[in-house]
Structure formats: structure tokens, C-alpha cells
Image (spheres, coloured by chain):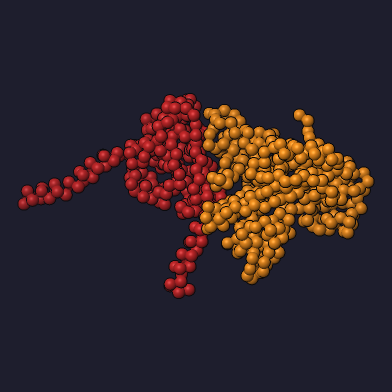
Amino acid sequence: MKTPDFSCSSAANLIRFAQLFNGLSMGRFLLGFIVAAASLQAAVAQTTVTTDPVGFLTLTVYGPASTGGTANTYLGLAFTQPVNYQATLSSASGTTLTDSSATWTATANGFNGISGAFYVELISGAGAGRMSQITGNTANTITTANDLSSFVTAGTGYKIRPNWTLATVFGSTDQAGLAGGTLITADQILVYSTSGQQYATYYYKTSGIGGTGWRSSASTSTDASNTPFLPTDGIVVVRHTAGNVSFSLAGAVKLGQTALPVVPGTNLLSNIYPSGTFTLATSGLVASGLTGGTLVTADQVLIYDNTANQYNTYYYKTSGIGGTGWRSSASTSTDASNTPIPFGASIIIQRINPGSFTWVAPQPF
Amino acid sequence: MNKVSAPIIAGILLCASSLFANSTTANWGAQISNGVGLANGTPLANGSNDLILLGSFDISNSTIAANGSNESFLMSNFTTFASAVIGQGDPGGPGSASDGYWTAVSTNSASTLGIQTKEIYYWVFNATTAGTATQYGIFTAPSNSSWFFPDDTSIAQSNTTDLSQVPHDSSGILWGSYGTGLSRDGSSPLYNLAAVPEPSTLALIALGLAGVPIAVKRRNRSSL
């Protein structure tokens, strides 16, 4: 199968990309326009200047049947922010990545010195698709939160992008239209920390002590609007107000495979792709290390059904009554391999077996 | 805090917690191994629609075991989260390899029911309703952290349990037994139900007991 070329270096490719998207079902999401990301700043001499295609999805936050009830929506950030810088690395050591040709300055490169605002993704080599937050940099080195050095050789490609934040996803003044209020009455945005195995809670505060704006449950007064998320972070919106809310998420389509760390316990991960054929079978989960077995011994994949307000649980069954393959908890024998991983949504991987693995999700289009 | 305001505040807090109750998706069954059979070792038939309840007791396991045959007492202390029937979720009719098994996905609010963090029990009957059963079994796994309803107050939860996780001793089998008979494919021993007095038998016993004071009274009169 030929892999589509989505580089936007030519008008022809843009048209091909738009045609592909127009021919695909987007479920409950609407695909908007595809335009060239002309704002890229990847202008270094030895860098191939291509831009990721961009578009938008309409994301829906579901409300309960009546105000006072509860509805959960598992959102996925199906796009990335536009690439800020793209080039190749010279070397790496520990958490330091070196691009000897770079001459970053605070004025020319927005990520310079802004800890937590940007992340780096390796785009070639053994670690293609791996991401890490940038915690600092010099004129030609980046310090990362995670050690990526074992995946880096001279010539490994990388991209630097801004993180999504509460303000860039939902709007600095809640243009998404989530219900504001207090921690109790407002819609809550939950972001799962795999390291802490707990949710961080955010909401849009509309009045009272501490003022108005995005806040975390930890402080009524500290501005949380720049709280960063990786595009692979899953987000749960818990809504208590009747009626659905829809808003658009615009960004760049992530190309290439994506590497997502999966640790023992709960992992809330976003489907980072906005389209294509992305099912349990094509997800790459089993090949990446998801452990099969029985319903109680296998790792589980949980996909939330907003209509039924319940989780659909899937696992890779390896033996016994009902045979081998992807199954749901509702039947040991019905093949569930074509179950789609929804676009614009996040899923939970319950890793009940010991040890971590990296889920290498292939580009699905 | 005065005596009046305390219950009011408690009531407000109770309303607030129930107002925002979420749900728990329970994946449960006997789909792996160790299905359910009658006391004589015959697997419960797929398609029989024999009833299984998923829920929690508000009495201790020792009290449950001590009153194992007292269905009305047990039922009055049981909160049902969901029900299923033998054969649910698997193909095949009576006599198939999946006799004695079921697979169910059930959603309810553990916090609304007031059983969040409470121990999970399977209550299996050999009839389509609890009141008509002549045998039942009560199973749990108190040492398994999955056998407790999650707290779904703040966010929807998922929980997975399976009968095969139930210990084969009195810590897990509060009424019933283990090991009499095999599953249809002959691969695994069954969890067995145990007999309980039929409702008609109970009525006769009650009638008989009611007659004892009368007989005693007559005997006393005749001895005078």
C-alpha cells in the first residue's frame, strides 16, 4: 500500500490531502478546510522545508439529560500546534539534544527559555514519534524532560512545537462555551497524570474570590490558562449542565507514527490523528506490547460510549472458549478487531501487567 | 454548630454528592473458567435464564454465611447493582460448552446506590427469580482489590471481575461449594450452588411452628 504524501510543499499535495479527507467518514466530527501552514518557521539552511497540512475538527462535549446530572466526554487533541522549528540533531547525551547548526535566540525562537511551553518530537530513526517536554535550551541544545538520547544518532530529525494549553484548546476566556462557575458547578476538565495515577482538575471560574479565568482545583486564584498538554494527553470533560457544547479545534495534522508510553496502571491517551482507518486491529497495540490473555488477565482498552454513558471494554484474547483475537467484555467469541478508535477522542489503556511499553501507533492514513 | 444546622448541612452535602453521581461500568461473569453448577455438579444450562445478581451486602461475610439459607434476611441486606442470566453474552443453547457461564456488561451508579467501595458479591440462583430458587450460591473475593465497587462520584469508573477469581474456600464461597462436576468441555471444576428451603417448604414450616404453641396449650390443659 502506498503511503500518501501529505507534505504541503506543493499545491498538488494539498489537493490530494483534501480529497482524501473528503472521502473519509469523520463520524460525529466535521472536517473543515485544509490550508497550507504558511506560518512555519523551519527555515534553516540544511532543513527540508515542508509543512504539515492543517484542518479543524468540531469537538462535542456531551451534557447530561438534565442539569444536575453528569456526563463524561473523553476528548482527544486530534491536531498539533504548528511546527515552530524543524531540523536534524547532531548528537544527544542524557536529556540534552544537540543541533550544532542551530542558533536559537530568545527573539527569533519563541521556545527559547520558556520552560514547559514547547515539546520536541523525534521524526526519524528508532525513536520516531517519541515526544518530550522541553525544560530549557541554549543556542544549540535542548534539555528534555525525558531521556531520548538512546534514539538519537547524527541526522535524526526532530520537530519543536508549542504545547496545547487550556487557553489554546478551550479559549483564553472559555470561547469553547463550557459551563463556568465554581469548582463544583462548572464543567471540569480532567487531565490524567500517568506518573501520579491521578487526575488534575481544571475549570473556568467566573466569579468570586480569586477572580475569573482558568483555575485548577488546587488554587482559586492562580491562572492555569497556560497549563500545557502534549497532543497525546487524553482529556476528560465532566459536565453537569444539560445540552451538548461544540467547539472547533484547529491545528496541524500530525504525520508519521506516534510513540506513546504506556505504564502499569491507568493510561489516558489521545487519538492524535483526525482521520483514516484506526481500529484495534490496526492500532499497533498488540505488536507494541499490549498483553493478551483473558478478560481478567489481559490489558484492557476502554472506549467511552457517550450515548450509553458507559465504557466499552476490549482486550486481546489469546485462548479458551471463543477463540483468539480482539474481544469485548460483552462476548468472548465476537470479533471486535474492527472496533474504531474514535477521532477527536481519547481512550484508556488499563495496563494490569507489569512493565511499561511504548505504543507505536502507525499513521492511519 | 447548633443541633439544627448540622443535619441541614449534612443533607446539603448528601444532595450535592448524589447530584453529581457518575456511573460504573461493571464487566462481570464466569467467562474464563470455573462456571456454575447445581449442587450435584450439573452445569446451569445456557439459555435457562437462571438469574445472577451483582451487588453488595451491608452485613459481614460471617453473618452472610451463618444465615446462608435465610433468603429473605439476606435479600433485605442486599443492594443489587445489576442482574444477568446464565448464558448471557455467549452463543450456544442448553448443553453447549458454555453452560454455566455468562458474560455481562452492566452500568449503574455505585455511589447513588451507596455501595461505592463496598465488597462485590455474585448471587447465583437456579431459577429465573430469586423467590423461586431451590438452590443458590453466594460468592465473593474479599482479598482481591477488584472485588470492591469503585467510587464513581467524581468520574465514571470501570470494574472487571470474574467468578474464577473467587477463592475455593469459605472466604469466597459464603453459600455453596466448589469442585463438584466439570464444565461441559471437561476442562474446569464448577462452583456449586447449595440447597435452600423452597418457599412452599418454608410456608409449611412456618405453619407448623405456628401450631406448636396451640399444641402445647392443649397439652397443658389436658394435664390439668
The colour applied to the residues of chain B in this rendering is red
User: Where residue B83 sits in the image (x, y, percent)?
Assistant: 44, 42
The chain that appears orange in the image is A
Q: Residue at x 45, y 32 (%)?
A: B87
Residue B155 visible here: no
User: Where residue B79 sits in the image (x, y, percent)?
Assistant: 42, 49
Number of numbered discs visible in the structure rendering: 0
Q: Residue at x 62, y 40 (%)?
A: A301
User: Where residue A360 sits in the image (x, y, percent)?
Assistant: 73, 39
User: Measured along the vertical axis of the image, is residue B192 above or below residue A137?
Assistant: above
Q: Quadrant of the N terminus of chain A?
A: top right
Along the viewing direction, whichever of B168 and A330 lies nearer the viewer? A330
Residue B4 visible here: yes
Q: Residue at x 48, y 54 (%)?
A: B112
Along the viewing direction, whichever of A262 and A19 lies nearer the viewer? A19
* Horizontal side, residue A112 vs residue A169: left or right: right
Q: Residue at x 49, y 27 (%)?
A: B187
Q: Quadrant of the C terminus of chain A?
A: top right
* Horizontal side, residue A48 vs residue B133: left or right: right
* Horizontal side, residue A259 vs residue A324: left or right: right
* Horizontal side, residue A343 vs residue A70: left or right: right
User: Where residue A229 sits in the image (x, y, percent)?
Assistant: 72, 53
Along the viewing direction, whichever of A66 and A225 lies nearer the viewer? A66
User: Measured along the vertical axis of the image, is residue A241 above or below residue A329?
Assistant: below
